[in-house]
Image (cartoon, helix red, strand yellow):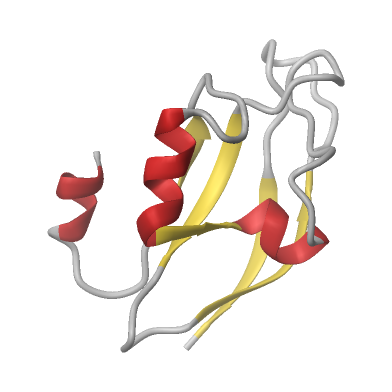
Amino acid sequence: FMWWGRQFSGPRIAGGDFNAWWGEWWIRRMTEEHSDTWVDVTGSNEDGYTVNGAVRFDYLFRGHTDTWRITPNAVWVPWTGTSDHNPVIADYTVW
């Protein structure tokens, strides 16, 4: 996934259901080249639960780059009944 994402120029935001707890291998790999938007905004990897109000499997990551800036302004996890996971939604400034 990361190799594929590197093929695109400009700012990168990657997100979705990673089915991984914070600190697991996939999440550690993503944070080598991306920042976790939830942690960037809240300062913690706690909360932001997307499954049953107790599990955080869904993430938004922003790519590290020297030519683009992606600044997260806000992040939230609203309740929805359309899936077994609640979405992670963020507001970014890109320049």
Residue that appears at 39% across and 71% down: 64
Query: In this orientation, which residue lies closer to the viewer: 77 or 26?
Result: 26
Q: Is residue 27 left or right of residue 78?
A: left
User: Residue 34, image x and y in percent?
Assistant: 43, 59
User: Residue 29, image x and y in percent?
Assistant: 37, 43
Query: In this orientation, which residue lies closer to the viewer: 81 or 38?
Result: 38
Q: Is residue 13 left or right of residue 10?
A: right
- Examine the rendering and report whether any part of residue 13 can be seen: no
Q: Is residue 3 left or right of residue 39?
A: left
User: Residue 33, image x and y in percent?
Assistant: 36, 59
Res 68 quadrant in image = bottom left
Q: How many marks?
A: 0
Res 77 quadrant in image = top right
- Examine the rendering and report whether any part of residue 77 can be seen: yes
Residue that appears at 81% across and 41% down: 46
Query: In this orientation, which residue lies closer to the viewer: 39 or 75?
Result: 39
Residue that appears at 62% across and 71% down: 92
> Quick one: quadrant of the N terminus?
top left
Res 36 quadrant in image = bottom right
